[in-house]
Amino acid sequence: MNITVVRKDPADQWDRELIQCDGSLFLSRVWVEAVAQSHQNRHPVFLYFYSGNQLVAMLAGLDIPIKKGNGRQLLFYSGFAMLPGHREALDAACKKALYDYSIQWGYARLTLKSYDLHHYNEIPHGTTPGKYYLHPRTEYFFDLTLGKEIILGRFKPDLRRRARKAGREGMVFRATQEPAMVTELLSLIKETYKRRNAKGYGPYNHFFLPLFYETEMNRLLLKGAALIFVAEKQGKPLSIQFVFAYQRRAYGIFMGTHPKGYKINAPAFLYFKGTEYLCDKEFSYYNLGGIQTNHRGLKIFKDALGADSMKSCEETTGFLQYPYKRWNTALIAIEKTKKSGLIPGRLKKPLIRFCEFLLNGQHKY
């Protein structure tokens, strides 16, 4: 199947077309422009994929510089939005077309994240095997159109009990769009980071979404495309979640909880009341976020919420242009080290750090 890639300035109907193709929230115009506007060297990219004269897929992301160098790269926060039917064949063909497009226009690297990716093809790189590095993920979501009673009934009894107990003990829920609450959230995220380290989950990136930080959160709030869920007691926030909420769909991005909040079940209360709130506001969908395959503790907690799960996979290429291609050996070494079952755990981190030292940060955003 021959696919033609066309880059266009987005018209007002982009987001409406995206819904028809069942596209991710992270392909929406409001998301891409919110992140792009933070720096003059970031450019929004809106791509249409045609088979003959038929539009078959859409994709939106960023044209950004290589972190240390003069080259540029393409970053997409999610995979393709596609018309129903023949998704497997279309996915393979569109991936190949995107890969060829990136080389043709001189991009040094291509990354396809998988946030809110509804339709994942188990053969993600189709006819271009070996051209993408794969990082499996799992996301958890509620189809809120099933109705509030059914959705809230899916929460495990123990979690419902803890949420109700927190309410009886004075916990209060509210949803807000106040930018001032972002500062409170950042403080609680640090507390959650400490707790997860203490539990042996290991260090992780506070801001796992590339290029999405405090400024971008505030911009989404001002655009009316985000909510902040707050669980507080006696006016003190004990657990806060930042939710990308747009066109009656929601995705929980960041969440932080105070140590006192954990003791009185603030996270359970926040998830329960937040889901109830979205049902009452007639949202159709609530994605609770994703986990890497090795986060057992997070998996247990999200399973207790009773949400459905969907598999996805982040995909990224090696360097596509010279002089960057000479660093592909170090990239390959990092990928093989991460996945190797033969290398002892105590040796993996030093090996990865050494390879990243050779790369000099050029593989980062």
Image (cartoon, rainbow, N blue to C red):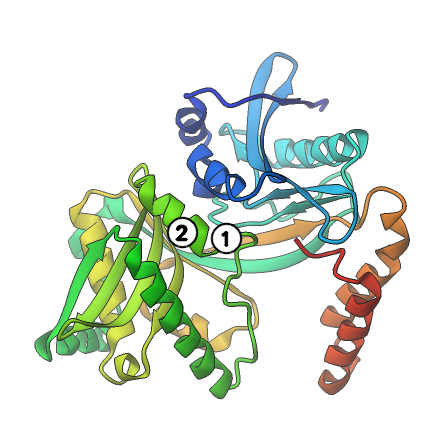
Relative horizontal placement of residue 142, taking residue 72 as reference (left or right): left
Q: Residue at x 41, y 71 (%)?
A: 189
Tell me if mark 1 has few (under 14), some (14-19) or many (20+) residues whose alpha carbon lies within 10 angstroms of its own.
some
User: The disc labelled 1 sits on which kind of residue?
Assistant: Phe
Q: Nearer the viewer, residue 91 or 16?
A: 16
Tags 1 and 2 touching, CB below 8 Å: yes
Mark closer to the chain start, 1 or 2: 1
For the question of whether residue 302 can be seen, the reply is: no
For label 2, count other residues whose C-alpha is less than 10 Å away and answer few (under 14), some (14-19) or many (20+). Answer: many
Quarter of the image containing the N terminus? top right
Q: Position of residue 202 (x, y in %)?
A: 56, 80
Residue under label 1, please give it.
212
Q: Answer with the quarter of the image where residue 98 lies.
A: top right
| Pick the front one: 184 or 192 | 184
Check disc 2 and report the residue beneath it: 217
Q: Residue 203, how many percent across, how many down?
A: 56, 77
Image coordinates for residue 86, horizontal then vertical, percent: 57, 30
Quarter of the rendering containing residue 161: bottom left
Q: Residue at x 38, y 71 (%)?
A: 187
In front here: 20 or 308?
A: 20
Farthest top residue in view: 53
* Residue lying at 14% horizontally and 78% vertically, measured from the top left: 165
Label 1, label 2: how far apart the Cα atoms are:
7 Å
Q: Amino acid at mark 2?
A: Met
Tell me what residue is drawn at x 80 percent, y 34 percent: 106
Q: Is residue 207 above or below residue 80?
A: below
Residue 181 position in % (x across, y down): 29, 60
Relative to 172, residue 60 above or below: above
Element assignment for label 2: helix
The secondary element bearing badge 1 is classed as: loop
Give above or below for 203 relative to 247: below
Q: Can you see residue 113?
A: yes
